[in-house]
Amino acid sequence: MTKKQTFKILIDISMTALFIILIKAFDTGLEFHEIAGLGILVLIAVHNIMNISWIKNVAKNIFSNKIKHKTKLMFVLNMLLTLFILTIVITGVLISKVLFTFISVGAQEQLIFIHKTASYICLGIIGAHVLVHAKYLAAMFKKLFLNIKSRSVLVPLSGFAL
């Protein structure tokens, strides 16, 4: 298992765990909720940058027969996740009670509704995303745990521990 593969798995685990924790905003506190929500945006950006060649290749061939249906489904799920995360972050900034209090917009109730609805839809998409990647994830976790002592696993893990 390469360092890049290990790092990508750790990014995915972090995004998923953080998103699930953030579903209950008042359980984590609004300050943590807002900061961690922005953190998810950074993790999504890193994830997409690390997979940019795959994204470009599939986008270029999405309507051809060169790409398997499962790959097309994964691409659509990834794009939907990115779109909904952006919706969640933008509405989150607009309804912020801690970090962005200097932004004052009306329609707070509607923005909160959009924020929550997009969050729950996103949670469902994450579930579908995990299911579609189940075989890949199982294989990667097996490699990760079998190679836990190797440098290619320990170095990315130590970076997450800092």
Image (spheres, rainbow, N blue to C red):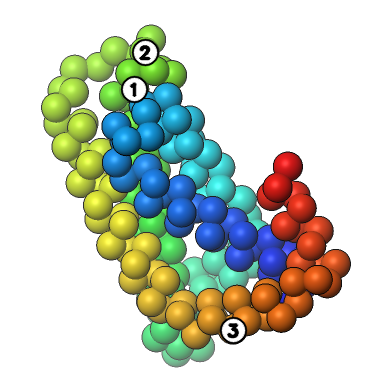
Alpha-carbon span between mark 3 and mark 1 = 40 Å
**Is 48 on the left or on the right of 155, as rendered?**
left
* Amino acid marked by disc 1: Ser
Quickly name the residue at label 2: 101
Residue 79 position within the rendered picture, expressed as x and y whole percent measured from the top left: 41, 60
Q: In terms of sequence position, does the residue under pointer 3 or pointer 2 come before the other?
A: 2
Which of the two discs, 3 and 1, sits closer to the camera? 3
**Is 28 on the left or on the right of 7, as rendered?**
left
Quickly name the residue at label 1: 96
| Quarter in which the N terminus is drawn | bottom right
* Amino acid marked by disc 3: Ala
Q: Do the residues labelled 3 and 2 touch (CB within 8 Å)?
A: no
Q: Are marks 1 and 2 in contact (CB under 8 Å)?
A: yes
Alpha-carbon span between mark 3 and mark 2 = 45 Å
Give the residue drawn at x 42%, y 24%.
31
Indicate whether 64 appears above or below 149.
Answer: below
Q: In terms of sequence position, does the residue under pointer 1 or pointer 2 come before the other?
A: 1
User: Which residue is at the front of the view, 11 or 84?
Assistant: 11
Residue 147 position within the rendered picture, expressed as x and y whole percent measured from the top left: 76, 77
Quickly name the residue at label 3: 139
Alpha-carbon span between mark 1 and mark 2 = 6 Å
**Mark 3 Cα-neighbour bin, 10 Å: few <14, some 14–19, many ≥20:** few
